[in-house]
Amino acid sequence: MDEEQPNNPLHGVSLKAILEDLVARRGWADLSERIRIRCFAENPSIPSSLKFLRKTEWARLKVEQLYLEDRQGVERNRKRNQRRAAMRAIRAEHEAAAAATSPPATDPIEE
């Protein structure tokens, strides 16, 4: 399936899935601010929005673009969090190694 459209990031993703993901992630209020269409601002619902988006290409393209930008941001954050977790693990190993090799602290009062 990916061989048919290798450069299409939306291949296999339905408009309904895109809209549901955006609503779950951003909410109707944010969608209506970012994309000025009435079906997002007044009595928003998935079915009415899908009906409008299927008829209106410019609105569908804006929704798809916002979805792609969101997915890129999620992927960027995931990679950044993986790098941060790896650095924390390395730092913890170094601190453990330093603690194991340093002499135990003695209390100057006991001497």
Image: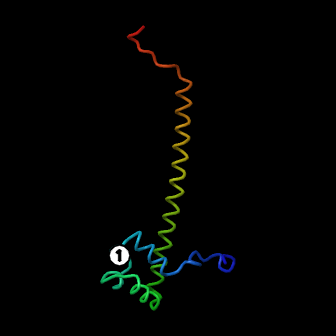
Q: Amino acid at mark 1?
A: Trp
Q: Quadrant of the C terminus?
A: top left
Image point 45% across, 92% down: which residue? 55
Nearest to the observer: residue 80 or residue 23: 23
Residue under label 1: 28
Q: Quadrant of the N terminus?
A: bottom right
Q: Position of residue 53 (x, y in %)?
A: 44, 86
Q: Position of residue 20 (x, y in %)?
A: 44, 76
When the figure is inspected, residue 92 is found, relative to residue 33, above or below; the finding is: above
- Please, what secondary structure does the residue beneath circle 1 have? helix
Q: Position of residue 29 (x, y in %)?
A: 32, 74
Left or right for 10, reference 35:
right
10 Å crowding of disc 1: few (<14), some (14-19), many (20+):
some
Image point 51% across, 43% down: which residue? 88
Image point 51% across, 49% down: which residue? 84
Residue at the far top in the pictured view: 111
Residue at the far left in the pictured view: 42
Residue at the far right in the pictured view: 3
Residue 10 image-quadrant placement:
bottom right
**Visual colour scheme:** rainbow
When the figure is inspected, residue 25 is found, relative to residue 98, above or below; the finding is: below
When the figure is inspected, residue 30 is found, relative to residue 39, above or below; the finding is: above
Image point 58% across, 74% down: which residue? 9
Q: Position of residue 3 (x, y in %)?
A: 69, 77
